[in-house]
Amino acid sequence: MPGNKEQGFSAPRGMRDFYPEDMALRNRLFDTWRQAAENFGFKPYDACVVESLELLKRKSGEEIVDQIYHFKDKSNRDLALRPEMTPTLARMVSARQGTLSLPLKWHTIAQCFRYERTTRGRKREHYQWNLDILGEPSVAAEAEILATAVSALEKLGITGTMLRIHFNSRALLSDLLKTVDISEAKHPAIFLALDKRGKIPDEAISELMHKAGLNDDETAKAWRMLDMHTLDDVRQTVPDSPALAQLDEFIRVCASYGFADRLMFDMSVIRGLAYYTGIVFEAFDIKREFRAVFGGGRYDNLLTEIGGQPLSGVGLGFGDVVIAEIINAYLPNDGESRPECDTAIGYMEESQRSAAILLAQKLRSEGDSVDMALAPEKPKKFFTRTGRGSYQKAVYLGPDDIERGSARIKDLASRTETEITLS
Ligand code: HAM
């Protein structure tokens, strides 16, 4: 318990400590995210984790607003730790709207804070890789965003047999609701209510819809919409829906990238955030054991709502918590004995230290990562310590090596040795 002096302190509930062994996966994940984003031409951006509470209240989804960590600074300003990056992105883009060339493709890895009930896959702090494209109205943007995420997943070893991208479209849901005469003004409230399916009892969802002004008949019709399971079901009801045509085009573009087999139409994917207006998606592991690995969609009105000019965007947030659980479950041996450092250098006595330092500096200048012992140690201790998978190579210097002017670098995997000159 934090603050308990007898038992010692621990991290506040829902917050994580990252020990070096935890950093190995985190760094690999961040490197993979960054490489995939650069590979697809996304530019990096960043902002402070502290945001204006007003902006977040105006822009974050209703659900998130209740989870914001907020405080007053010493000048009585209402500030908060960001729960997501999208309002900040909208603020930054609208501030430079006239000068940015469109479409823009930006990415970032942002630490986010939400006061959530901590369960499997849910912490009160997480890192989230955000990919966003603004200024491209066609589904090419959705496909490009997902292709980038799929490429990162593949680099992490998560293949098409382990994960599916479930997609839907709020515009399509709107078209369906219009066929049963539910007015457009009520659609956002229906989306947010139905998105809570599985999280709260169905009666509570109906209650939310009643509160939003739906009568019993309309509530029943909204529920019935979820009985459609395939795009063909939908096609029979709204054959001429432009949103449906857009989904067909979306699938075609994803097929050109080669990942259409990972897509799955899913009526229950609606998303909890209010700002989505078009295609929405969430990725789940194939066994549906874990929460969403990533989620996102198209938002059309985000910028206008904070005073910018109309600009359509698509984006996703890919968190670090669920993906770690999926890697552990689906690739149990992943990361085992992955060397963290190229070369370990040890020595028997103080008198070999300067030769060890010279060798370490030479190898470092050539680009190797080198962990040089800070004190002499016995050969047995050195080779036991370095033989546990953390290093690729090891060099141990004794008085004979100094006399000969050379030493042997041992490849710890193949057990072969190469002679190197000491200078
Ligand atoms: P989100 O669905 O709220 O979307 O979050 C995206 C991802 O962040 C989730 O799928 C999950 O991996 C991770 N995540 C969210 N909350 C937590 C938590 N408490 N603990 C652990 N992981 C979590 C958004 O935030 C949107 N702003 C994404 C977006 C970007 N849409 C457009 N652009």
Image (cartoon, helix red, strand yellow):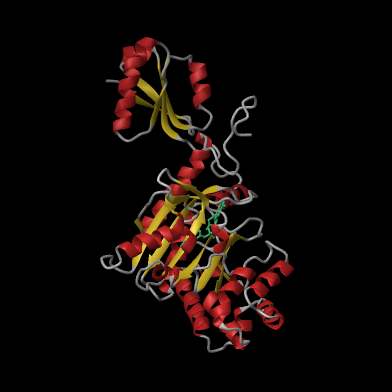
User: Residue 388, percent across and down?
Assistant: 53, 29
Q: Quadrant of residue 168?
A: bottom right
Q: How many marks?
A: 0
Decide if residue 198 is on the left or right side of residue 412: right
Q: Quadrant of the C terminus?
A: top left
Q: Is residue 266 above or below residue 288?
A: below
At 60% across and 80% down in the image, what residue appears?
231
Please indicate, yes or no, whether residue 161 appears anywhere in the rendered image: no
Q: Is residue 340 above or below residue 26?
A: above
Decide if residue 209 is on the left or right side of residue 30: right
User: Residue 25, percent across and down?
Assistant: 51, 43
User: Residue 52, percent across and down?
Assistant: 42, 54
Decide if residue 89 is on the left or right side of residue 115: left
In this rendered view, identify the residue nearer to me: 159 or 107: 107
Q: Residue furthest front?
A: 76
At 55% across and 81% down in the image, what residue appears?
184
